[in-house]
Amino acid sequence: MNRIAVLGATGSIGTSGLDVIAAHPHALQAAAVTTHRRWSELAQQAQKYRPRFAVISDETAKSQVDRQQFPAGTELLFGPEAIETVACHPEVDTVLCGIVGAAGLRSAWAAVECGKRIGLANKETLVVAGPLIMQRAAKTGAQLIPVDSEHSAIFQALQAGRRQDVRRVILTASGGPFRGWTKSQLANVTVAQALAHPTWNMGPKITIDSATMMNKALEIIEARWMFGLEPDQISVVVHPQSIIHSLVEFTDGSVIAQLSPPDMRLPIQYALTYPERWAGISPTLDWATAHQLEMFPPDLEAFPALQLGFEVARRGGSAGAVLNAANEAAVQRFLEGTLTFCDISRSCREVLSAHNFLTQPTLSELLRLDGWARQEIARWMA
């Protein structure tokens, strides 16, 4: 029995992960579920899956929680440290890291320290601290398996050849709701427009990142560290249908791709069952119907966030932590209506350019710069 801690259980990754667990009760078990403050939803999940632990990381919610809604066999814990505790617990075999943003870094780090198998959906973990995470995993024996659909596709396609024979990887991007828009057209984008993703159903932060293409910038950085690639071995193409999830090109010119309908349950299941492949609950392609699969080069002028990803992948060091934190703060300001859509990328570039770059930062230095970058976004607005 693979006992799984689902971190961020009430989010889109967490609920998809629990769907996969429910589909394979003979082999998968939810050992722990966590949320930040959505305790009522967490209680419903606890009633259904009967985990050993349920964690609410927002301690201010402690007085509001009705403990009677949680089953007697589930231990209820509070605070961010409790998430790290369950990530390292001996009754947990695999940690599904689905907490969005830099908030997911500490729990992922804890899982790495304890040598766990990790299904990594939180791309920010490697964006912020990629070299540190990968170096530590090599020492502790932790196994990182990507859950992002693009990185899962690369992970799968890489198995078609030797790592030293890889020429490059090609990340696909849906293009979000503004594919084909010009820079001038993007100047007046509303929050509602940016949240209307054409193919994926995700949370607001990731959806906005898709609209700005910052999600692809972060994925460039994640791929750099996850797969040990040089920055010039990573390319991006826009693929509106979201069927080809990414491609790997080998030195002989062969290109291997992973295709499937857009559904996060497939890469989640693969991360939980690797190296085996089980019958799943995700939809499959209908080969009896016609398909049109298009790919276009990205427009770096209209979507300057993408260029930031390439630059940060080349620089390494503290640049990823600063870009990620600045983007999280800017996206939140945009959602609140105090920052324009185009100002998200613009402010991130200025904060990145202004920071005191460190070539080999420690984890504490990265966390300090995370806080600094968020404050700089507020100053930039002023």
Image: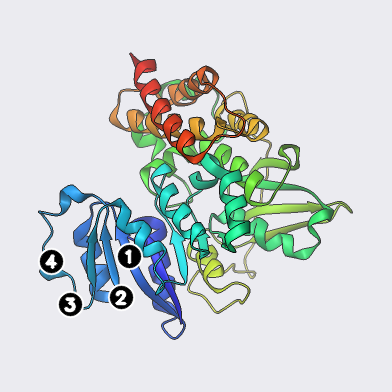
- Please tell me whether mark 2 or mark 1 is closer to you in this view: 1
Q: CA distance from mark 4 to mark 1?
A: 15 Å
> Which residue: 65% across, 33% down?
310
Frontmost residue, 38 versus 150 = 38
Q: Is residue 10 visible?
A: no
Query: Nearer the N terminus, badge 1 or badge 3?
Result: 1
Circles 2 and 1: CB distance less than 8 Å?
yes
Query: Nearer the N terminus, badge 3 or badge 4?
Result: 4
Q: Exactly how many numbered labels are in the figure? A: 4
The residue beneath circle 1 is: 33
Q: Amino acid type of disc 2?
A: Tyr
Q: CA distance from mark 3 to mark 4?
A: 9 Å
Spot the residue most to the top. 382
| Residue 67: numbered disc | 4
Q: Amino acid type of disc 1?
A: Val
The residue beneath circle 2 is: 49
Q: CA distance from mark 1 to mark 3?
A: 15 Å
| Residue 72: numbered disc | 3
